[in-house]
């Protein structure tokens, strides 16, 4: 495994990790069989791609903040803090969403990334965060449980947990 020269940090999207971001996300798309079309424009003008993400913006009908989990030149994953809940997010989505790109999975990064993401959420006044995950997603469930997630009533198909 690659030895990271410094502990990963949650930062606003940055052009510093261009190659690592693009190859990591492309590997994930190919693994999952999801759309890769967005990577063309992202690679052609990465500055514009980052500029569209490095500030708070309305997504899922609420303001949200995107963070990247990085160590020096390495991009490991993304975490999004949603500043509020809608009825839809209360059932599926919650306050925080995240993924770790394939090369960096199963090394404890998501667990630590969520811990740092919860700090970011608390700084925004979210003292009690809702996390949701698909019942088949054992990895995400473990990440949430390891961060103190307490199960709540299941309103839809996703499992729901509160932290804080
Ligand atoms: C879910 C995800 C973020 C986990 O990332 P990760 O960095 O591999 O997670 P960690 O290394 O912190 O592992 C956390 C726990 O999950 C377990 N785990 C990780 N991958 C697993 C897998 N594929 N199957 C079963 N358990 C798994 C780990 O063993 C660990 O549990 P343990 O401490 O009891 O051993 C990553 O798999 C991912 O990005 N998946 C796709 C996107 C996604 O599902 N996002 C969450 C939406 S709610």
Image: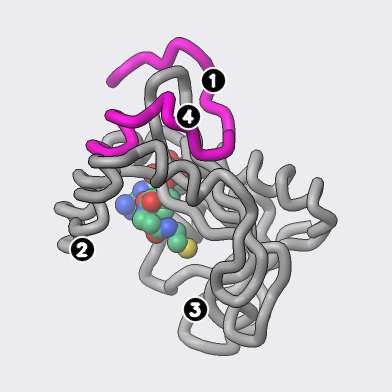
Spatial separation of the CA atoms under disc 2 and disc 4: 24 Å
Q: Quadrant location of the N terminus?
A: top left
The residue under label 3 is: 158
Q: Is mark 2 in CB contact (under 8 Å) with mark 4?
A: no
Q: Quadrant location of the C terminus?
A: bottom right
Compared to 5, does 46 lie above or below? Answer: below
Mark closer to the chain start, 1 or 2:
1
Mark closer to the chain start, 1 or 4:
1
Q: Is mark 1 in CB contact (under 8 Å) with mark 4?
A: no
Q: Which mark is residue 35?
A: 2
The residue under label 1 is: 7
Q: Is mark 3 in CB contact (under 8 Å) with mark 2?
A: no
Number of the front mark, 1 or 2: 2
Residue 135: x and y, percent? 43, 73
Q: Residue at x 47, y 29 (%)?
A: 70
The residue under label 4 is: 70
Q: Is mark 3 in CB contact (under 8 Å) with mark 1?
A: no
Classify 10 Å Cα crowding around label 2: few (below 14), some (14-19), many (20 and above): few
Image-based side of 74 in relation to 144, left or right: left
* Badge 1 element: loop
């Amino acid at each position: 495994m690659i030895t990271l020269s410094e502990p990963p940090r949650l930062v606003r999207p940055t052009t510093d990790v261009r190659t690592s971001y693009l190859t990591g996300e492309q590997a994930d798309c190919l693994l999952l069989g999801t759309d890769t079309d967005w990577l063309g424009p992202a690679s052609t003008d990465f500055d514009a791609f980052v500029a569209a993400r490095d500030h708070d913006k309305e997504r899922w009908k609420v303001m949200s903040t995107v963070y990247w989990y990085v160590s020096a030149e390495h991009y490991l994953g993304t975490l999004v803090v949603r500043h509020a809940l809608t009825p839809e997010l209360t059932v599926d989505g919650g306050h925080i969403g995240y993924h770790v790109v394939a090369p960096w999975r199963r090394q404890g990064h998501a667990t630590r990334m969520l811990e740092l993401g919860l700090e970011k959420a608390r700084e925004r006044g979210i003292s009690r965060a809702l996390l949701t995950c698909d019942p088949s997603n054992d990895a995400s469930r473990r990440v949430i449980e390891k961060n103190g997630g307490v199960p709540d009533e299941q309103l839809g198909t996703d499992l729901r947990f509160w932290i804080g």
